[in-house]
Amino acid sequence: MGRKEKMAELVHKLMYNPDQILNIGIAAHIDHGKTTLSDNLLAGAGLMSEDLAGKQLVLDFDEQEQSRGITIDAANISMVHEYEEKEYLINLIDTPGHVDFGGDVTRAMRAIDGCIIVVCAVEGVMPQTETVVRQALKERVKPVLFINKVDRLIRELKLSPDEMQRRFMKIITHVNKLIKQMAPDEFKEDWQVNVNDGSVAFGSAYWNWAISVPFMQSTGLTFKDIIEYTEKDQLRDLAKRSPIHQIILDMVVDHLPNPLTAQRYRIPKIWKGDPDSPVGEQMKAVNREGTLAMVVTKIIVDRHAGEIATGRIFSGTVRVGDEVWIVGTRNKRRVVQCGIYMGPDRKNMDEVPAGNIVAVTGLKEAIAGETICGGDEPIAPFEAIKHYSEPVVTVAVEPVNTKDLAKLIEVMRQVSKEDPTIQVKIDEETGEYLMSGMGELHLEVVGYRITHSKGVEISTSEPIVVYRESVQGTCTDVEGKSPNKHNKFYLHAEPLDDNVYQAIKDGSIPEGRVKGKELQQQLRDLGMDRDEARGVEDIYQGNMLLNLSKGIVHIGEVIELIVEAFHSVMDKGPMAEEPVMKVKIKVTDMKLHEDSIHRGPAQVIPAVRHALFGSILMAKDSLFEPIQKLWVQAPQEYMGSITREIQGRRGQILDMAQEGELISIEAKVPVAEMFGFSGEIRSATEGRALWSTEVTGFEQVPENMQPEIVLQIRKRKGLKVEIPKPENWLT
């Protein structure tokens, strides 16, 4: 029997003992060593050659990942680790570090209970480190810390033990500060990482060694020995004496929670239902005999098996042949296959019980974030998985061969299902197929996959930035008349309060139709007036619709049509047909015809749309552009070249810090100015700069540039060149 078969047998035996299961992830800034660490853990479990560990990058099995040297998709694997004479099943997810693929990290966090945060000893805590810690803590995932690339401090930077210790303490303090800021109140202290208790490990994933204080105490190995082994180039001997997989997995078993512990505090946070209901209790108890409750965290389209849904089972058991509910669509589907991941391979099983991560085929309509359940009726869904970034770059896509047009539509639908941070839409007026993503690299990778993996050769336009429209002031009520002049609507637009908008963006106020009194107290706590809080009808893409009218007899018949008109205007604003953000629309009054035949969709929707367009323009509609934070680290002599490069792109330097020979620059730059940056920064610094970016939101376009940019957008979309005025809509 091969190693993999043996491992699969062991996994099968342990998956029924939730107290011996650990669902964990590895997360970090790009290039800090996540996938190299994963290799070592697989080698330790006997799933790959130890000689290749750290070099083969087994979990980067996509050809794009191998050619670019980065992780693009979260990859799953199950393995067994022995600790204190007891075996544990470890379900591991290796996640991407590049900001363009942050959506995969967010989705992976829903499936796991604990996370190894990897930080490079040389670079320290970087922007994406902060983001992944935030993503983990928001999902109540407990972190431990691995400080990687310690060999470079000894060999390249030649730091003394004291200097190294100071550097380690700086990293640990920074991570603990993030945990204190972002962890739920009851875990702010308990989840702090600590060298002495072994929740921090140090090492080199590339050279296959690691240490922790408990390991040093039990073996007598000292930091002085580590320095000696490294300086004498005896790293293989060090890896034998202090193998990384043992130290890291011991730390995982010792400090990260099993499903029985984690689901008790995670379920009330991530599930919308009543935690004290029968299903809620079954989930908190990881009851494999209970009602099936599972969240899909990823969809992969396999050429042979079709769509495979990866997910975490919180209660019940997934069995081949069972019919299950897809809660979002209220449809039932039959489970065709289920199993576990062994890296790029899947091992099919007859059933997989609660507490595990499972791969299921047959759930045709399921999407990432979907709730799957058993029982006679669908259960309450899990909280929507909230992504931190939103698509800011768009390309137009067309097939090279027109005969592939129908296939392209199907493939683009598949792509947006596999990666929900890709938005796909067909512009009916221009006939263009538009694909929006997190950045140039994101769209490049997806475009490559459409051509090479999905078999539809495509050509894409130059990337276009997605702008937003928003209002700067308020206006008096405007009147919208229906085409038959029998219905009138009175409304106005104003900016949405910052803290309310922020609460919508971070997910603490859910988007969608508001029923009854559910949000009133929360909105009042955020400073909203009592009557306004009572009038909120709908929240859509960071905008809010309020109905403040009183005593309207037929309101129930027209409110859905008003919401429909509100959505269509928020999707395409009046100035440049870009999405609208951070706007509050107040409907203050309406006059409706007595006869329902005169107040149908053809009358209500145009009246409300025109009033919305007019009021947004009157409230000083302005264009907002996406902004990226940019961090550049390079030898000091290149400081002038870097600042020139940033300022030439309308960038603003926010901070500069010097550490030894290196200078670190933090800046913010409009996304529109960042195309081609990677080539330019390389030539400006002779390839010596390390840099990373993170989309941080939208800022107003400088007033002197707005007319020109609006004109370019309108020309590109084939709209009339003149920007509409309020009176165009309100006559």
Image: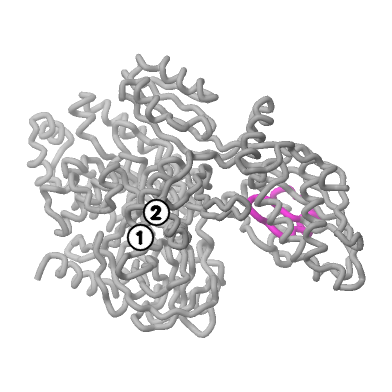
Q: In this view, does 142 lie above or below 645?
A: below
Instruction: Assess whether mark 1 and mark 2 are in contact (beta carbons under 8 angstroms).
Output: yes
In the image, is 602 to the left or to the right of 13? right
Q: Mark 1 points at which residue?
A: 257
Residue 102 visible to the viewer: yes
In the rendering, at what x and y percent does residue 642 appear? 42, 20
First to last magenta residue range: 526-545
Q: In this view, does 570 lie above or below 633?
A: below
The image quadrant of residue 77 is bottom left
Q: Mark 2 points at which residue?
A: 142
Q: Which mark is residue 527?
A: none
Dot 1 amino acid type: Pro
Residue in view at x 80 percent, y 66 percent: 558
Mark 1: few/some/many CA within 10 Å (<14, 14-19, 20+): many
The image quadrant of residue 121 is top left
Dot 2 amino acid type: Lys
In the image, is 19 to the left or to the right of 692? left
Q: Mark 2: which secondary structure?
A: strand
In the rendering, at what x and y percent does residue 254 appear? 28, 56
Is 540 colored magenta in this rendering? Answer: yes
